[in-house]
Every structure is written in structure tokens, then in C-alpha cells.
Image: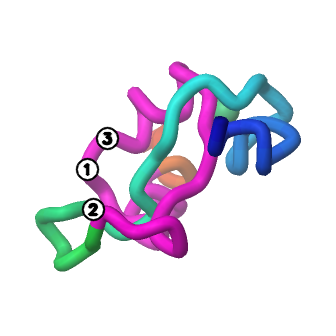
């Protein structure tokens, strides 16, 4: 089970429930292990298809 390699969600302290693409397919990401991290359902849903950098910006400007 590949999820077991991560101790939990890469973005928060939640459980490792799904595999998330660090670089989404739309941004040229590939379905390789180096492009995958574990995430919880909540973070995976929030991040959606944004790249990690885009998502970080979005998360920091949510109060706008
Ligand atoms: Zn999370």
C-alpha cells in the first residue's frame, strides 16, 4: 500500500487517505511516484487541480 509510505497528509496533520498529484496533469504532471503525495480528503478537495504554488497562494489570500 503506497499510502503507508507517508505518515499522513502532506498538507496538514490529517490522515493519508488519497494520493494527490503535486503537479496536476493539466500542468504537465505525470502519474509517477515522485509526483504523488498522500493527502486527506479535505486537502485534496481544496487543492483540486491547482499546482502546489498556486494552491499556497490561494490558501493565503482566502480572506479577500
Ligand atoms: Zn490534509
Q: Which mark is residue 24?
A: 2
Compare marks 2 and 3 and give the one earlier in the sequence: 2
Which residue matches tag 1? 49
Please report contact status of discs 3 and 1: CB closer than 8 Å, yes or no. Answer: yes
Bounds of the magenta segment: 31-58
Task: Please provide percent x and percent y for residue 50.
Answer: 30, 56
> Left or right of 43: which side holds 25?
left
Residue that appears at 46% across and 47% down? 20
Please report contact status of discs 2 and 1: CB closer than 8 Å, yes or no. Answer: yes
SS at circle 1:
loop
- Image height check: is 8 above or below 60? above
- Image height check: is 32 above or below 45? below
Q: Quadrant of ligand 1?
A: top right
Task: Please provide percent x and percent y for residue 33.
Answer: 50, 66
Count of marks, rendered view: 3
Examine the structure image and report whether residue 47 is included in the region drawn in magenta: yes
Residue that appears at 80% across and 36% down? 8
Q: Using the image as rendered, state which of residue 23 and residue 5 is in the foreground.
A: 5
Q: Which mark is residue 21?
A: none
Amino acid at each position: 500500500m503506497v499510502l503507508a509510505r507517508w505518515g499522513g497528509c502532506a498538507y496538514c496533520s490529517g490522515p493519508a487517505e488519497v494520493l494527490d498529484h503535486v503537479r496536476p496533469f493539466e500542468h504537465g504532471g505525470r502519474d509517477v511516484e515522485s509526483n504523488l503525495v498522500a493527502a486527506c480528503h479535505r486537502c485534496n478537495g481544496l487543492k483540486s487541480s491547482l499546482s502546489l504554488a498556486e494552491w499556497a497562494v490561494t490558501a493565503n489570500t482566502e480572506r479577500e
